[in-house]
Amino acid sequence: MLDDTVFAKARAEDIRDAPFPHLVLEDALDPSVYDRLARTRPSYPGDPAVGNRRLAIPAWMLMALDLYDPVWRALARTHTDRRITDRVAELFADRWPAHLRGVVHRGTRFGVMGRDGYDRADVLTDARLEVISPVRGEPGTHRGGHVDTPNRLFSALFYLRAPDDDSTGGGLELFRYRGVPPDPVDAYELPPDSIERAATVPYRANTLVVFPNGPFSVHGAEPRGVTPHDRAYVFITAEVENDLF
C-alpha cells in the first residue's frame, strides 16, 4: 500500500535536524498520478474575494462523495490508513519525540476524523485537502509561526502548486525560539519576537514535508505576494483525544 503514497520514496537519511527534525521530499508521487490530482483538484470552496482564508475538504468527504475524482478518493483512503502513521514513526525512529513513544502500539484502534469518534478509536487520521484563497490587497499569510495542537502526532503537507502559479512565497517557514518558549506554546500564533525563522521549505508542486509534532516544532506559512492564485496542499495527520505535551 505504501508504494502508492507520498511516503513511498521517503528515506530516513534525508531527514534534516535543524531547526527541528523534518523531512522534505520532492517529486513524491509518480508524475502521472500527481498530474491527475492536479487536474482534478477541487478549487477553493469558499468566497475567493476573501483573501488568505483557509478552507478544507476532509478525507472522509473525499472518500464518500462521488463528485470527487477516483484519484482523490484513493489518495484519501490510502493516506488515512494506520500504516501511514507507522511509517512516519519508523522514518523518524530515534528522532521520534519521547512524548510520542508508546502512544501507538499493536492494539491501537484507528479511525478517520469526521467519520469516527474516540469512543471507537484511539487515533483519528486525516488526509484533507486544504486550500488558501488568493491574496487580496497586500502581501500576507493566513497563519504565522505556531505549534500544532498538542494532541497531534505528526504533520505532513503535500504541495499541489498549480503550473501557472507565478506568485511569490507560500512555502513552509520553520522557526526556533529566541529564548525560553512562551507560555502557552499552543497559541494560534506565537509572539513574533519569541521566534526566529531558521529555514523555509519552498512551495513546490509534488513536494512533501513531514515532521513529528512537539513544542519545538514551530512553523508557519510563508507570506505570499498579492496573487489571484490559491495555495493548496494535502494535510496528512493523526491525533489522539488528549494532549501529549
Image (spheres, helix red, strand yellow):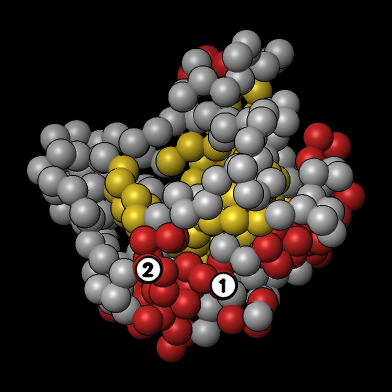
User: Mark 2 and mark 1 in contact (Cβ < 8 Å)?
Assistant: no
Q: Position of residue 192 (x, y in %)?
A: 48, 19
Residue type at tag 2: Ala
Q: Tag on residue 239?
A: none
Q: Residues within 10 Å of mark 1 (few under 14, many from 20)?
A: some
Task: Check the picture and name the quadrant holding the C terminus.
Answer: top right
Q: Position of residue 158 (x, y in %)?
A: 49, 61
C-alpha separation, residue under disc 1 versus residue under disc 2: 14 Å
Residue 236: name its quadrant. Answer: bottom right
**In the rendered view, would you say 202 is above or below 243?**
below
Query: Who is closer to the viewer here, 213 or 162?
Result: 213
Identify residue for label 1: 78
Residue at (49%, 59%) from the top-left corner? 127
Residue type at tag 1: Thr
Circle count: 2
Identify residue for label 2: 64
Most extreme residue toward the bottom, as rendered? 32
Callout 2: SS: helix
Q: Residues within 10 Å of mark 2 (few under 14, many from 20)?
A: few
Query: Who is closer to the viewer here, 119 or 47?
Result: 119
Callout 1: SS: helix
Q: Is residue 142 in view from this perspective?
A: yes
Q: Position of residue 100 (x, y in %)?
A: 79, 41
Q: Position of residue 202 (x, y in %)?
A: 48, 55
Q: Is residue 243 left or right of residue 55?
A: right
Most extreme residue toward the front, as rendered? 119
Residue at (64%, 70%) from the top-left corner? 7
Q: Is residue 194 left or right of residue 163?
A: right
Task: Check the picture and name the quadrant holding the N terminus.
Answer: bottom right
Work out whether mark 1 precedes mark 2 in sequence or the reverse, and give the earlier one. 2
Q: Is residue 202 left or right of residue 214?
A: left
Residue 151: name its quadrant. Answer: top right
